[in-house]
Image (spheres, helix red, strand yellow):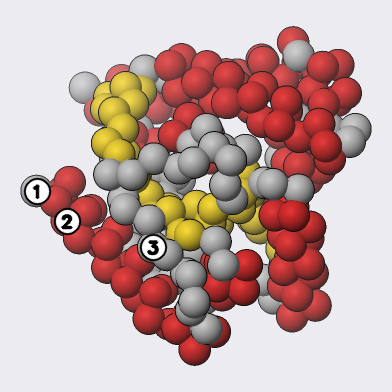
């Protein structure tokens, strides 16, 4: 029985990359045009949401979203979530309708096809470089002024699978306070089980999402960064514990 599982996992991983690449290849000219100007980003974002839905559906993932509060489409936010899977980017795109820009590690830009568009539409950061981290704030500021929102996975990477939720970096919270935008905490309940970074793992099934009540930053100072960092992390950790039960 076990050899069949390994064969399934190998084919399942290959199928994922086929689903990632196929829409990009089919829509390549339109996608390229949509990223020529930053002002055209909302159109690119709509295409990205369709791409994400196509992948999740094709993988057999059934998304169930619970919302305690819904973002105003005319406002900018800081979206944060736990990071456990290669499917996190797709699930975030499906969950959030407000056009947002990912802040992510520069290594993802090396992925064929996906990396081409990721590099040109996201804010890339080299976490080992203080200069790079500072540049992120400037680029994010420009995007927020254009009416975009920002999305960051505050764990700063994908933690070991034995860790339910790693400690959060301060960047997302400091940025939200600086720009006085609300933080939208989101918990992904099943991504680790559905499609983790462990090669021989994964299966079709449910993907539960909880969009929590927003954390307001109105009137907060930089000294409040650690407090709301811990508040947001505890919110996600408690929800993960509920899902795991």
- Secondary structure category for the residue under label 1: loop
Quadrant housing residue 71: top left
- Secondary structure category for the residue under label 3: loop
The reply to whether the C-beta atoms of the residues labelled 3 and 1 are less than 8 Å apart is no
Determine the CA span between mark 3 and mark 2. Answer: 20 Å
**N-term-proximal mark, 3 vs 2:** 3
Q: Residue furthest bottom?
A: 223
Q: Residue furthest top?
A: 26
Q: Is residue 131 left or right of residue 239?
A: right
Q: Nearer the viewer, mark 3 or mark 1?
A: 3
Location of mark 3 (residue): 215
Q: Residue at x 64, y 55 (%)?
A: 103
Instruction: Report x, y in % for residue 108.
Output: 68, 48
Q: Nearer the viewer, residue 112 or 241?
A: 241
Determine the CA span between mark 3 and mark 1. Answer: 26 Å
- Say few, some or many: other residues with alpha carbon within 10 Å of mark 1 (under 14 / 14 to 19 / 20 or more): few
Instruction: Report x, y in % for residue 19.
Output: 57, 19
- Secondary structure category for the residue under label 2: helix
From the image, which quarter does the N terminus lie in? top left
Q: Is residue 72 left or right of residue 230?
A: right
Q: Residue at x 48, y 30 (%)?
A: 94
Q: Is residue 46 left or right of residue 80?
A: right
Location of mark 2 (residue): 241
Q: Is residue 186 above or below residue 33?
A: below
The reply to whether the C-beta atoms of the residues labelled 3 and 2 are less than 8 Å apart is no
The reply to whether the C-beta atoms of the residues labelled 1 and 2 are less than 8 Å apart is yes
Q: Is residue 203 above or below residue 190?
A: above
Location of mark 1 (residue): 245
Q: Is residue 27 above or below residue 183?
A: above
């Amino acid at each position: 029985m076990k050899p069949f599982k390994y064969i399934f996992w190998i084919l399942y991983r290959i199928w994922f990359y086929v689903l990632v690449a196929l829409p990009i290849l089919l829509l390549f000219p339109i996608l390229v045009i949509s990223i020529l100007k930053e002002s055209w980003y909302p159109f690119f974002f709509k295409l990205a949401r369709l791409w994400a839905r196509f992948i999740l559906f094709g993988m057999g993932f059934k998304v169930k979203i619970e919302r305690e509060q819904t973002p105003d489409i005319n406002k900018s936010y800081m979206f944060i979530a736990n990071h456990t899977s290669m499917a996190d980017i797709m699930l975030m795109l499906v969950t959030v309708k407000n056009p947002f820009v990912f802040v992510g590690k520069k290594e993802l830009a090396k992925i064929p096809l996906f990396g081409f568009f990721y590099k040109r539409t996201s804010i890339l950061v080299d976490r080992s470089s203080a200069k790079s981290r500072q540049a992120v704030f400037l680029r994010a500021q420009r995007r927020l002024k254009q009416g975009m929102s920002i999305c960051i996975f505050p764990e700063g990477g994908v933690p070991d699978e034995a860790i339910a939720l790693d400690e959060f970096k301060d960047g997302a919270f400091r940025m939200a306070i600086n720009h006085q935008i609300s933080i939208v905490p989101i918990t992904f309940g099943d991504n680790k089980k559905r499609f983790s970074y462990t090669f021989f793992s994964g299966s079709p099934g449910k993907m539960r999402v909880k969009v929590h009540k927003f954390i307001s930053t109105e009137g907060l100072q930089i000294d409040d960064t650690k407090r709301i960092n811990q508040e947001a992390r505890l919110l996600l950790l408690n929800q993960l514990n509920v899902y795991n039960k």
